[in-house]
């Protein structure tokens, strides 16, 4: 049995709790404090007056809330500089060492544990081979091991952990009765086990949605208000951010771009249906098409190497892959009109083999004016957006309040 001796900080992650008028009053005050923390996160060494101006709160309320945050150790006051015109207002900053956030990204092949402070600086990271796990309890136990391994590697003296984010693979049901992977049960077990160990808030979501948050907080998504992330791995995943907020059906009903019927019409998908796009525009699709071409090693890395060497069969596989990816891009462009589409995942290591043709294929299906406005970006395959996203989902609940029904609070 793992015994937890990790310092924790409860109550920093905002969760909806407005059930009574007293709760709503408390929530309103709490959300204002977190709005101040977010202002300090984005603007170091800022005065009380500038914070009030940025948040729209009156000066009295701002000063009162800041005093609470200073007492709680979340905000630091600095000495004001003396100038020829007198003493400047006291500058404030976020105390980034007041807490830390633990992220766990459980991939099909690799698992990454990452511990970061409130300022987004890495404290430590571990990378492990994901074992063969296919049941919720196994996922939960593996998440626990990864969490404690990460904390142990960080050593003593870490800031207290205030929240844990975990990402799990987005696999779908085989049919209506036999679940290939029950995401809801796995998430519930992971959350339950980690909350029992650490007694802090635990947030779990599917990997591609967390990759979208990782891009929003740390990657190319920082430069856009509306963008989509296509995960090109074993499968084909989609995450969408609109106006800086992650949208979609969440863990219960994630967007299943890979299972719209735009693939090879007669190819049966592992979900049981015919013609799924994932059977073309994914690692699974590359393997299937490479087998049809009679290639001795049908796995995506080997097919990519063969294509770079000019192998005709491998080049045909990537042409079909690019055409399928183009249909996926066009679908996302027509539905969401994003400013950017960010390609991520392991298959971006072979991006030079398909991006140009995929863009051309998209132009045959997408609305022209929308496609012109959508920048196609290939993310750095070494950026580890999933691991960053598992931390970002907690940051999102500390510094933003869009997940809270503000109407209920007000």
Image (cartoon, grey):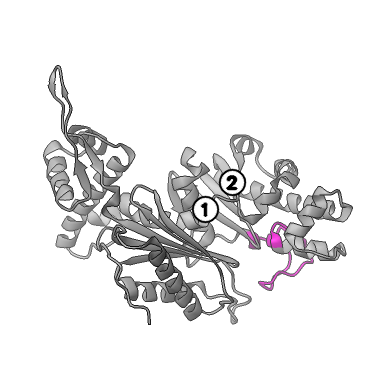
Disc 2 crowd rating (10 Å Cα; few below 14, some 14-19, many 20+) is: many
Q: Nearer the viewer, residue 265 or 207?
A: 207
Q: Position of residue 382 (x, y in %)?
A: 58, 51
As displayed, is residue 173 above or below residue 29? below
Residue 2 is labelled as none
Question: Is residue 404 visible in the rendered structure shown here?
Answer: no
Please tell me whether mark 1 sits on a helix, a strand or a loop. Answer: helix
User: Which residue is under mark 1?
Assistant: 385
Q: Seen in the image, is 166 located left or right of residue 91?
A: right
Estimate the spatial distance between the alpha carbons at disc 1 and disc 2, rounded to whole Å. Answer: 9 Å
Q: Seen in the image, is 317 located left or right of residue 25?
A: right
Locate residue 124: give its quadrant: bottom left
Q: Residue at x 27, y 65 (%)?
A: 7
Question: Is residue 241 visible in the rendered structure shown here?
Answer: yes
As displayed, is residue 287 above or below residue 329? below
Q: Nearer the viewer, residue 151 or 365?
A: 151
User: Which residue is under mark 2?
Assistant: 379
Q: Position of residue 77 (x, y in %)?
A: 18, 40
Q: Position of residue 282 (x, y in %)?
A: 69, 59
Stretch of the chain drawn in magenta? 258-283
Q: Are marks 1 and 2 in contact (CB under 8 Å)?
A: yes
Magenta region, main secondary structure: loop
Q: Is residue 273 magenta?
A: yes
């Amino acid at each position: 049995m793992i015994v937890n001796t990790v310092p924790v900080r409860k109550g920093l992650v905002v969760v909806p709790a407005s059930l009574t008028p007293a709760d709503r009053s408390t929530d309103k005050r709490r959300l204002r404090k977190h709005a101040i923390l977010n202002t300090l996160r984005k603007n170091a060494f800022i005065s009380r007056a500038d914070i009030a101006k940025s948040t729209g709160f009156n000066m009295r309320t701002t000063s009162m809330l800041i005093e609470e945050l200073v007492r709680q150790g979340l905000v630091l006051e600095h000495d004001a500089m003396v100038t020829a015109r007198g003493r400047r207002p006291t500058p404030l900053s976020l105390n980034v060492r007041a807490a830390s956030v633990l992220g766990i990204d459980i991939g099909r092949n690799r698992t990454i544990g990452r511990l970061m402070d409130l300022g987004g600086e890495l404290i430590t990271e571990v990378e492990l081979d994901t074992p063969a796990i296919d049941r919720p309890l196994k996922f939960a136990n593996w998440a626990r091991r990864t969490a404690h391994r990460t904390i142990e590697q960080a050593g003593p003296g870490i800031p207290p952990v205030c929240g844990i984010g975990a990402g799990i693979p987005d696999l779908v049901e085989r049919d209506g009765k036999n679940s290939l992977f029950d995401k809801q049960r796995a998430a519930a077990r992971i959350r339950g086990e980690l909350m029992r160990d650490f007694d802090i808030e635990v947030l779990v979501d599917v990997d591609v949605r967390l990759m979208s948050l990782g891009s929003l907080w740390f990657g190319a998504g920082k430069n856009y208000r509306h963008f989509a992330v296509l995960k090109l791995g074993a499968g084909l995943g989609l995450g969408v951010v609109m106006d800086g907020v992650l949208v979609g059906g969440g863990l219960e009903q994630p967007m299943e771009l890979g299972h719209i019927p735009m693939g090879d019409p007669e190819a049966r998908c592992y979900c049981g249906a015919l013609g799924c796009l994932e059977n073309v525009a994914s690692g699974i699709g590359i393997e299937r098409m490479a087998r049809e071409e009679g290639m001795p090693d049908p796995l995506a890395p080997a097919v990519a190497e063969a294509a770079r060497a000019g192998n005709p069969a491998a080049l045909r596989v990537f042409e079909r892959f690019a055409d399928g990816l183009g249909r996926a891009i066009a679908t996302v462009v027509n539905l969401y009109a994003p400013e950017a589409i960010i390609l991520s995942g392991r298959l971006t290591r072979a991006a030079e083999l398909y991006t140009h043709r995929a863009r051309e294929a998209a132009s045959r299906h997408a609305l022209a004016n929308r496609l012109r406005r959508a920048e196609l970006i290939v993310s750095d395959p070494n950026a580890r957006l999933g691991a960053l996203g598992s931390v970002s989902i907690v940051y999102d609940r500390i510094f933003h309040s869009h997940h809270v029904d503000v109407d209920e609070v007000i």
